[in-house]
Image (cartoon, rainbow, N blue to C red):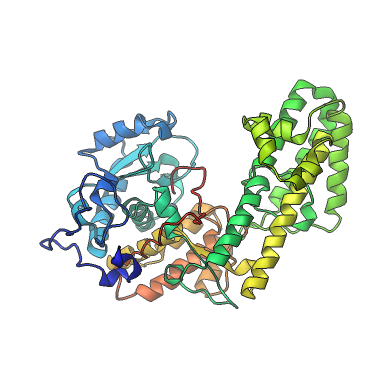
Amino acid sequence: MVPCLVMLASGCSTEADPGEPRCADPLYGNGTCDLDTSCSYPDIDCFLTFDDQASAQTWWTSNAFAAGQPTAPASDPRFANVKAALDEGWTAYKATHDVGDLAAHEVQLVLINIPTMRLGAFVSPTAGRDKAALAVFVELPFLSVGLTQDEILSVMMHELEHAVGLHVIPAVTERTARFYSAPGTSEPFGGDQPDNAGIRSLYKEWTVRAGNVGYLGDTELAGLPLYGIGGSLGDAFAKIVAARAAATPAPCAASKARLDALETQVLNLRAPLDGSVNLASTAPTTIVDVLNQLTSECFMGVTGDAIHFTALALAIDEATLRGSLSAEVRTAVEGKAVIAGFYNWVALERTHMRDVQTRFQTLTGTAWGRLRYFSTEEAADDSSVSSMAALGLSGDLIGSALVKLEKIEAMCQPLVDGGQPIPYGENLIDTHHATCWRAGNARRFADRVAGAPRYTRPPLLPADDTRVFALPAEFVMN
Ligand SMILES: [Zn+2]
């Protein structure tokens, strides 16, 4: 039906050089965004383009995603420099990628005037997430990180691939992801890998659990709910404890301070390169002790179980939540005091995460740490490498830019430069999982494309309902 999707894109179609005939597929430019055309470039109908910068800025301001954030005008002294990088980038991009009718359009720049960097640079879908806006959004603090002009350019190239590759459309995110394992110390290029349905299924199972308790599944964490690591239960627990401590400050002061100290200690243990924690075998004893004190001092006399309070904290219907839970979870939580219920629930989810990791090892013969997935992030990195190389610049500048943004240069750069193995990162929920690994990947990809920088976008995998790669809660891609 769509023969080009199962061929390498290089064999798919003619390049969109000026003078080349427009893609003949009747789906191209028919007024509806079609992801499956026989063209070598995305459907022009999948883009929101702007006539000028003011239109893009106005569109962003009125966009629900903008969340009331102020923009800086094009007259801002910082604008011209970034726009120059973006324009240079767009020219190079068009020389290394098929873009079709999009070539006639300008990519707009919108500066966002916020004091603290949230996403750095990003692109955005339209409100229905069914089109990509042809614009790059840059938060002003991003310009104070100390990136060189070439590194800023490399980030613009990354964002251009997010926009032109339609990475902000959820179905594209899903159909780009390829799950595989990297045996030994090998690091195959993700874009070349066939998608392994068994690995994808295990990833899905793990992600559902990690979405509840966060990405850390260590035995030593037992049932300690942790906030801010991607788990709804941990975030709900933090809200509940904060609310209780606000309502009854005196009896909660000591036990909450102890809990806060313990959580901070654990979160601070996360290793900068891979996000792992390494806890003492005595940690579970401490955790139980801290939570017991919380129960007896702060939550004394509180009725209602952890499911009740989770529904409250997450503003979801309690009966619906309760009905959606497995018998195993309900047995572990119902009828238990709230803190004990959370502990049991979280511990159970972590047990299942470790079980998935064991099954991965059985399936692939490699450790869980060798699980890999090619994502739209890696696709954007690879594309940036190709574009930079086409400009005669160092292809892997996207790597050094990312490492600088994450402030891990001293630790990471020697590994990249030495071609050393770099951990993939434990936070597999996040497509930005391990910056240093991405920098290493960019270096290897730069070596690969040296001399032949034209970028071939990996074809979208077939649409099917077992694709699991949910877009992160954050709508935009930095
Ligand atoms: Zn990105």
Residue 88, given in percent of the width and then of the height, sits at: 25, 55
**Left or right placement of residue 373 versus residue 30 in this view:** right
Q: Which of 191 and 442 is in front in this view?
A: 191
- The quarter of the picture where residue 398 lies is bottom left
Query: Residue at position x 50%, y 68% from top?
Result: 440
Residue 153 percent across, percent down from the top left:
34, 55
Q: Residue lying at the far left in this picture: please name it.
A: 19
Residue 419 left/right relative to 462: right
Of 192 and 440, nearer the camera is: 192
User: Is residue 265 toward the left or the right of residue 316 in the image?
Assistant: right
Q: In the rendered image of this protein, does residue 167 appear above or below residue 188?
A: above
Q: Is residue 47 above or below residue 94?
A: above
Camera-nearest residue between 283 and 213:
213
Residue at the image position 41 percent from the left and 46 percent from the top: 121
Residue at x 34%, y 64% (from the top left corner): 457
Q: Where is residue 91 in the image (x, y as percent from the top left)?
A: 23, 57
Quarter of the image where one finds residue 306: top right
Residue 224 showing in the rendered view: no
The answer to whether one can see residue 450 in this image is yes
Q: Residue 332 in the image: x percent, y percent?
A: 80, 44
